Image (cartoon, rainbow, N blue to C red):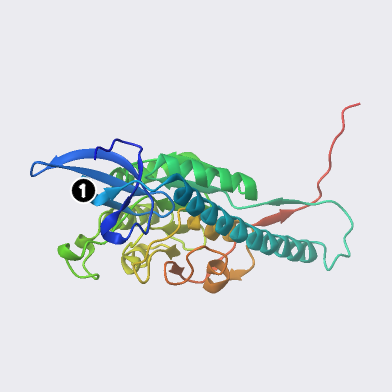
């Protein structure tokens, strides 16, 4: 069977558990092989053509609908959280609702650097839906360490997302061996370069990692939140829910890790981090000057 770039396929050897998009085709030892990016998870893989199969339209649609329902549920839970955070900020800023004037709020600005332009667009759409101010940049994972410094200078974010695709390969080494991962070392190097620009864990909140990433090295490099503690796959949109929580939490409040993870699609097996400070700021007064 022949396959081409952008085809949606599954792997027979994994009981067609995940949908993948073919992003490249190459020849290895005389056989055609596809480079695969997960459709809903941030996993990169390769597989020979004979291991690939198309799913029929009905099954593919059922999976896509199930994923959309899960995403919507997570969004609704986050929206409830956001409303509570806004109400808390209103109460604190108005001295227990004793101030009746208008005020304004400035959520944390996000810089989202992604190794997959398709996922970047999905994430930017969700940021817009949630109301998080964001700039998105596509950058190949291998180029991130040398480019992150200029990105930070250009965009001056409060929150930085460093993500794309990753994978652990057992044949390359133990799970503790950073060289056994596709892009974890690049993510870790990028975090370290970012920390050279902004050393404080409170002045720049960093999320780093993708599917199966080397969690410990990313935290040690200086990330506040990272994937993947148990080396499982993470959902493509999980970074958005994490940093949106930070963006809407008042800067006087610290965020406990579970409060950040509970509305993600992956949870604590795929995501973790350290207690961090919120970045939302509230100001007053806010006057709308109307034209005469």
Residue 191 image-quadrant placement? bottom left
Q: Is residue 193 left or right of residue 67?
A: left
Residue 250 visible at all = no
Residue 170 image-quadrant placement? bottom left
Q: Quadrant of the C terminus?
A: top right
* Up/down of 121 relative to 268, above or below: above
Residue 218, image x, y percentages: 35, 63
Q: Is residue 212 left or right of residue 292?
A: left
Residue 41 image-quadrant placement? bottom left
166 or 100, nearer to the observer: 166
Mark count: 1
Residue 268, image x, y percentages: 46, 72
Query: Which residue is pictured at 44% across the width and 52% down the height?
Result: 40
Query: Which residue is pictured at 58% across the width and 60% down the height?
Result: 246
53 or 254, nearer to the observer: 53
* Farthest left residue in view: 29
Q: Label 1 crowding class (10 Å Cα cut-off): few <14, some 14-19, many 20+?
A: some
Residue 1, image x, y percentages: 24, 40
Query: Which residue is pictured at 42% across the width and 67% down the height?
Result: 270
291 or 226, nearer to the observer: 226
Residue 267, image x, y percentages: 49, 69
Residue 167 visible at all = yes
Judging by the rendered image, the residue that carries numbered circle 1 is 50
* Up/down of 155 relative to 193, above or below: above
168 or 131, nearer to the observer: 168
* Farthest right residue in view: 292
* Up/down of 41 relative to 227, above or below: above
Q: Is residue 268 left or right of residue 218?
A: right
Q: Check disc 1 and report its element: helix, strand or loop.
A: helix
């Amino acid at each position: 069977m022949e396959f081409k770039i952008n085809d949606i396929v599954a792997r027979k050897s994994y009981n067609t558990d995940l949908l993948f998009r073919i992003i490249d085709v190459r020849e290895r030892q005389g056989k055609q092989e596809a480079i695969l990016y997960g459709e809903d998870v941030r996993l990169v893989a390769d597989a020979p053509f004979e291991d690939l199969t198309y799913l029929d339209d009905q099954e593919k649609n059922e999976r896509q609908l199930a994923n959309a329902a899960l995403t919507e549920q997570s969004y609704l839970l986050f929206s409830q959280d956001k409303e509570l955070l806004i109400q808390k900020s209103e109460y604190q800023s108005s001295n227990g609702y004793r101030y009746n004037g208008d005020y304004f709020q400035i959520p944390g600005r996000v810089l989202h650097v992604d190794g997959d332009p398709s996922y970047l667009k999905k994430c930017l759409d969700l940021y817009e839906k949630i109301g998080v101010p964001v700039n998105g940049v596509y950058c190949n994972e291998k180029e991130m360490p040398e480019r992150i410094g200029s990105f930070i200078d250009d965009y001056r974010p409060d929150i930085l997302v460093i993500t794309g695709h990753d994978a652990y390969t057992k044949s390359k080494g133990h799970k503790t061996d950073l060289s056994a991962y596709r892009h974890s070392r690049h993510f870790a190097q990028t975090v370290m370069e970012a920390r050279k620009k902004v050393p404080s864990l409170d002045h720049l909140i960093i999320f780093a990692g993708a599917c199966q990433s080397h969690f410990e090295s990313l935290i040690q490099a200086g990330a506040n939140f990272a994937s993947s503690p148990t080396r499982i796959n993470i959902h493509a949109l999980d970074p958005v829910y994490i940093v949106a929580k930070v963006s809407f939490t008042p800067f006087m409040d610290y965020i406990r890790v579970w409060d950040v993870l509970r509305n993600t699609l992956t949870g604590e097996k795929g995501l973790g981090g350290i207690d961090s400070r919120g970045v939302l700021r509230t100001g007053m007064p806010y006057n709308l000057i109307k034209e005469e």
